[in-house]
Image (tube, rainbow, N blue to C red):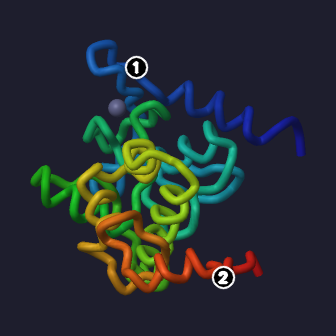
Amino acid sequence: MSGCPQNDFGARMAARVYPDLNSGCWLFFGRDVNGYARTDLNGKPMLAHRASWEWHNNRPIPPGMFVCHKCDTPVCVNPDHLFLGTPRDNVADMDRKGRRRCVALRGANSPVARLNDRAVVEILNDYAAGTSSTVIAERLGVGKATVASVLRGETWKHVEGERPRAGATSASNRNRRTGYKRRSAK
Ligand SMILES: [Zn+2]
């Protein structure tokens, strides 16, 4: 074994990437799966844009999340053109734009409802912690309207969490006044 596998990956990737000066896309040679490029990262076979995201962000893609393209170019591996999205939001985004942007996860990797519950909890927690809905939307790679409707309780009502103002129930306001029971992190 020699050197750092991640540097090896960077060198290999650079050798296979063709920068498109107009779009800023980094086009990866060797498209394979539904127009997406395939490579491997530290011995793990991956689609090139997912490998690029992991390598540039120096962390694994969170379970169940998609790496989507802002540029709608499946073989692009420019980290600035990639963002994380949830499966359901990805589908909603595709519908809105009338095009496919991400590779779907299938089988055991696609527990869509549960993962989206988690994303909704994240939205509610982040918003309660003071993060703006714009930032949350960007972070999750979803539209602001998607985040807003979650916060208003119009969608994902069944997911427990603190919703701001209008969407909040009177019960939760009452609880807050009388000593809101904070759930421990356990
Ligand atoms: Zn691109």
The answer to whether residue 77 is above or below residue 174 is: above
Q: Which mark identifies residue 19?
A: 1
Q: 124 and 14: which one is in front?
A: 124
Q: Is residue 107 visible?
A: no
Label count reads 2
Q: Is residue 65 above or below residue 170?
A: above
| Discs 1/2, front | 2
Residue 165 image-quadrant placement: bottom left
Is disc 1 placed on a helix, strand or loop?
Answer: strand
Inspect this view and state whether residue 182 appears: yes
Report the front residue among 172 and 158: 172
Q: Quadrant of ligand 1?
A: top left
Residue 116 drawn at (x, y percent): 41, 74
Farthest residue in the top direction? Answer: 21
Measured as percent of width and height from the top left, residue 101 is found at 27, 51
**Mark 2 residue type:** Lys
Mark 1 CB within 8 Å of ligand 1 = no
- Quadrant the C terminus occupies: bottom right
Q: Quarter of the image holding residue 25?
A: top left
Q: Residue at x 24, y 73 (%)?
A: 154
**Residue positioned 13% across, 50% down in the render:** 97
Query: Residue most toward the front?
Result: 178
Q: Residues within 10 Å of mark 1 (few under 14, many from 20)?
A: some
Instruction: Return the x and y of residue 51 as percentages of the image width and height.
Output: 56, 48
CA neighbours of label 2 inside 10 A, class few (<14), some (14 to 19), many (20+): few
C-alpha distance separating marks 1 and 2: 53 Å
Q: State the residue position of label 2.
A: 181
Amino acid bearing label 1? Pro
Label disc, if present, on residue 122 of the rendered structure: none
> Looking at the image, is mark 1 or mark 2 earlier in the sequence?
1
Tell me where residue 22 appears, x and y as whole percent.
27, 14
Q: Work out whether 8 lies above or below 170.
A: above
